[in-house]
Amino acid sequence: MRDYEAIVYLTADPRTGIPPAYLRYLFRYCVEAHSRTTLSPQTWQSSLDERLIDHATGADLDGYVWGAKWQSLYPGGSIVTGSTRAEAWTKAIGIDFHEVRLAANGHELTLVFSDLHVSELAPDYTPWRPST
């Protein structure tokens, strides 16, 4: 509730020779967290079937498969410059706050936070993966 964690899988074109990596973004001292859908009302309407909350039962159905348990971070993250929310919290608490927007294919998450820790996870890190 105080901190929010995002695990990002980074990849590059295999021809570059850059190996993929998992980065952990830990947004600390989050005083605000807002989430909203990026899906259209039409997509929501066609995605109400309960079977869509599980990848195994929803993969072959029409609609958005909620049970994927991950989102593509696209178009991506951005810092909200001149954030009045962050400025108000900075004045109220006395430490610097920042606002970031993480836009993914299903939701947009906006966080107002004070500190950010970024670390690379071990090469053998195993996230949840959908069953095949």
Image (cartoon, rainbow, N blue to C red):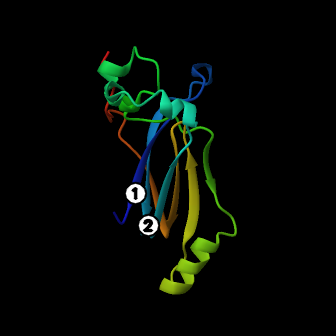
In contact (CB < 8 Å): disc 1 and disc 2: yes
In the image, 19 versus 9, the foreground residue is 9
For the residue labelled by badge 2, is the local secondary structure a helix, a strand or a loop? Answer: loop
Mark 1 burial class by Cα count in 10 Å: few <14, some 14-19, many 20+: some
Question: What residue is drawn where x is 48% and y is 26%?
Answer: 46
- Residue carrying label 2: 30
In the image, 53 versus 121, the foreground residue is 53
- Residue carrying label 1: 4
On the rendered structure, is 63 left or right of 126? right
Q: Specify the quadrant that holds the N terminus.
A: bottom left
In the image, 28 versus 121, the foreground residue is 28
Q: Position of residue 120 (x, y in %)?
A: 43, 45
For the residue labelled by badge 1, is the local secondary structure a helix, a strand or a loop? Answer: strand
Q: Position of residue 27 (x, y in %)?
A: 45, 60
Q: Position of residue 30 (x, y in %)?
A: 44, 66
In the image, 79 versus 34, the foreground residue is 34
